[in-house]
Image: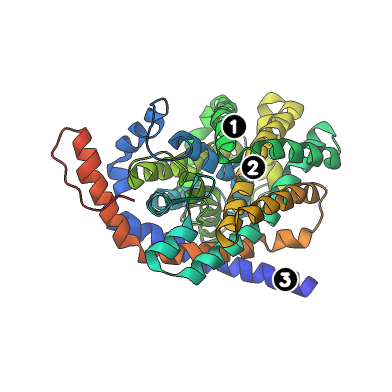
Amino acid sequence: MNFIETLVSNVSGFLWTYLLSIILIFTGLLYTIRLKFFQYRFFGHVFKNTIGQIFKKNKAKGTITPFQAFTSALASTAGATNIVGVPVAIALGGPGALFWMWLVALIGMATKYAEITLGIKYREKNKEGEWVGGPQYYIRKALGWKKVAALFAFLLMLEISPSIMVQANSITTQVEGAFGWPVEMTGIAIAIIIAIVVFGGIKRIGRVTDKFVPFMVGFYLLGGLIVIGANVSELPNVFALIFTHAFTPISAAGGFAGAGIAQAIRWGIARGLYSNEAGMGTGPIAHSAAQTDHPSKQGLWGIFSVFVDTIVICTITGLTVLVTGTWKEVGASNASTMISNAFGSFYGETFGSWFVALFLLFFVVTTIGILIFYGEKQAEYLFNLKTAKIMRFVYLISIYIGAIGGLQFMWKILDLMLAFVVLCNVIPLIFLSKEIKQITEDYIHRVYRQNKGEPSVKLFSDQ
């Protein structure tokens, strides 16, 4: 078993460190250049037509509102990855890892925009009258790659179980440490709460996430900004560390073991890609249910989501652990406790631990809920609605198994399975860049210019 675990770890490490990082960055650059830096040129337009439109009534085709689709997708990316992943990147790659995290997010915006746009264009209605879509649909319908589409769906359906187990375990151990609650009790409670949510389908998930996610993100950001504000004198030095050590090695200091340039690049890129999920193909599954009248209009939410997830939330986490100095006090093996220590340095050790545990608890509930929805949609695509309902129960059982620390070998293959899921999605994305360019040009000519009172021209056929 040790040999297999080592092999899985080595193969996964190679794929994420080299192959996937290169392909994902290439794809992001391809779309950024081919769309003529769309995510930067139209950044103000993105804000105006995403967060600026959340209270506007929408009668377009779809199952949930655009904002509910955004918060549902954000629920699967924000949370544990932002709180635990960023300190791990800093512990192993140094402060310079934040720079590379920002860089990969700036180009990843174009990739996520493309995924969601394609998800809307090739979505369809299921037997329950709900709109469904995602990579499996655009891979099959746009390219005719039926086997690749089926492989994506199958691998993602399997990958959801270990992903849920890891999420459940991360929160039950945090809660046990903060409040002393037994992991078994917390696991059962989480499973019951999530069951109530997911049995209502994407409509109930959307109603829950559009209430909880903005509140949780805002509460966390406020908590972090207060800590940063209390240590504002450290900010100039922190930014100097980030930009200097993105290109130069940094020596050991306290519990920090030191890091070279390659480590800063590796961990910054890996955590950035893992955090915002640009290129992974999960975001389009939630966004395909959105009410919208043009594929690119929902695609704008992809640009905004990467900005919020990585540029905002991850940055606040990173700056919090850097300005408080906890990145030098806590070793890499305990990097997951950095943010608790950072909050504890200002609010007190007990409150800091409680704050992070409660934040993770709420976020993990919404994260697991949307992950189950993703898994169900893959089962529905491969088999039928009945099988999708069966998988729902399988995933709910996975919550308890993960909570008590069971089947840990499955956790180890999580990164490996996810790597193949990404490959099944990102390679087709490269072949579909011409179509995304046409859809984007149509949006600019027919929607953007029309809104500005300029003449519009229709360049492609709607879905």
**Circle 3 residue:** 6
Give the label, 2 or 3, closer to the camera: 2
Q: Nearer the viewer, residue 287 or 278?
A: 287
Which residue is found at the position 71% from the left and 51% from the top?
Answer: 395
Q: Earlier in the sequence, mark 2 or mark 3?
A: 3
**Circle 2 residue:** 369
User: Which kind of residue does numbered mark 2 sit on?
Assistant: Gly
Report how far apart the C-alphas of labels 2 and 3 lie in the structure.
31 Å
Extreme residue in the left direction: 455
Residue 258 placement (x, y as % from top left): 61, 55
**Quarter of the picture holding the N terminus:** bottom right
Say if 342 sits above or below 247 in the image: above
Does residue 402 appear to the left or right of 213 in the view shown? right
**Circle 1 residue:** 208
Residue 222 placement (x, y as % from top left): 56, 26
Does residue 215 appear to the left or right of 456 in the view shown? right
User: Which kind of residue does numbered mark 1 sit on?
Assistant: Val
Q: Earlier in the sequence, mark 1 or mark 3?
A: 3
Q: Nearer the viewer, residue 41 or 289?
A: 289
Give the label, 1 or 3, closer to the camera: 1
Which residue is found at the position 56% from the left and 56% from the top?
Answer: 267
